[in-house]
Amino acid sequence: MTLKDNLHPRNVHKHGYDFTALAKSSPALSPFIFINKYQNLSIDFSNINAVKALNLALLKQYYKITYWDIPSGYLCPPIPGRIDYIHYLADLLKVTNNNKIPNSEKITAVDIGTGASCIYPLLGHQQYKWRFIATDIDPISIEYANKNIQANISLDDAITCILQEDIDSIFKGILKAGKKYDLTMCNPPFHRSMKEATQGSQKKWKNLNKTKDNARAKTKTALTNNPKSQDVTLNFGGQNAELWCAGGELSFIRKIIKESCHYQQQVLWFTSLISKKDNLSAIKQTLKKANVAEVKVIKMAQGHKNSRFIAWSFLDKEQQLNWFNTK
């Protein structure tokens, strides 16, 4: 188990994966575990079935999620990085909550592009009891997100999934007039085209392949017992809408900013992950033109690389501090 110093202090995964404990709570993970060349327990992270089994084991042990699944080919999210975003959002809300971490069902968050995994709402509710509105333009993603919610009793009435039928809109038809939302969040598609997304996937595949031969040898039994898992694919997967859009993440975040102007008094903090640091300057310029009251850039870890998310509010300091009193 390796300490990951760049993860949030409250992130339970900062010490790495305890595969022995995880296999006890989720026996389905056991066939994928092997001893790597460093004499540590590990799995083949290029095998989608192994990664899905790991995710379910983590969700069971740390977040009391008993059922979780995604359809073939859809994005399989790394949980340590996903929960990090949630923890930093809690710190953001803490400032306007009498310096206390908001651990309450009174908090309402909106997840833009929740995906089939619905991972942010699942983690956010289980960790902090927040309620979520989960949106996506893909009907299959909404279908599976609802399956994941309905299969876990603890999530009853905590997460509402909404299909965004207008693919050119972000908040329209989602945010209700007169209702207040504490924050919005988004992990935007960061590639500008299918070609760019494919090149990015090939690069990740190449990096995974460096240790893949050893991993496949160690998991030969598991692959033999499960013929479907012989079709090894990228562990992260992803459909078109999950990986790319015209203009990439810069264009997508600019669209969020443009629409956020229409909901200035309804949302305390609008936020979005930014994968490419080079986009930060342009995004700040767009926010300046939108006359937002405050902008924050929070550095964090996202998977194996340093990342950040940007947060903006149209409310001044006094309005922010009074938010929970007037909500």
Image (cartoon, rainbow, N blue to C red):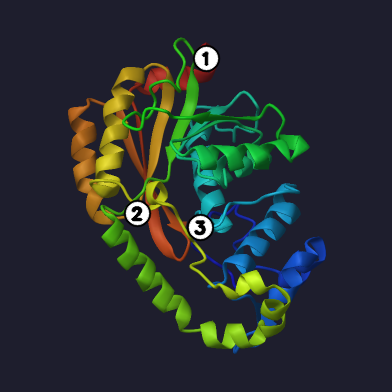
Mark seen at residue 275: 2
Q: Which residue is mark 1?
A: 327
Relative side of 29 to 309, left or right: right
Mark 1 nearby-residue class (10 Å; few <14, some 14–19, many ≥20): few
Query: What's the residue type where badge 3 is placed?
Result: Gly
**The N terminus lies in quadrant:** bottom right
Quarter of the image holding residue 260? top left
Image position of 121 with respect to 275: above or below: above
In 3D space, how far apart are the residues under numbered discs 1 and 3 (Cα atoms)?
41 Å
Image position of 54 with respect to 170: above or below: below
Percent from the top left, x then y, of residue 124? 60, 40
Tell me which residue sits at (51%, 54%) in the image: 74
Image position of 301 with respect to 298: above or below: below
Mark 3 nearby-residue class (10 Å; few <14, some 14–19, many ≥20): some
Q: From where the camera sits, is residue 16 visible?
A: no
Mark seen at residue 7: none
Q: Which is more foreground, mark 1 or mark 3?
A: 3
Mark 3 or mark 2: name the one nearer the start of the chain. 3
Q: Which residue is most to the front?
A: 227
Query: What's the residue type where badge 2 is placed?
Result: Ser
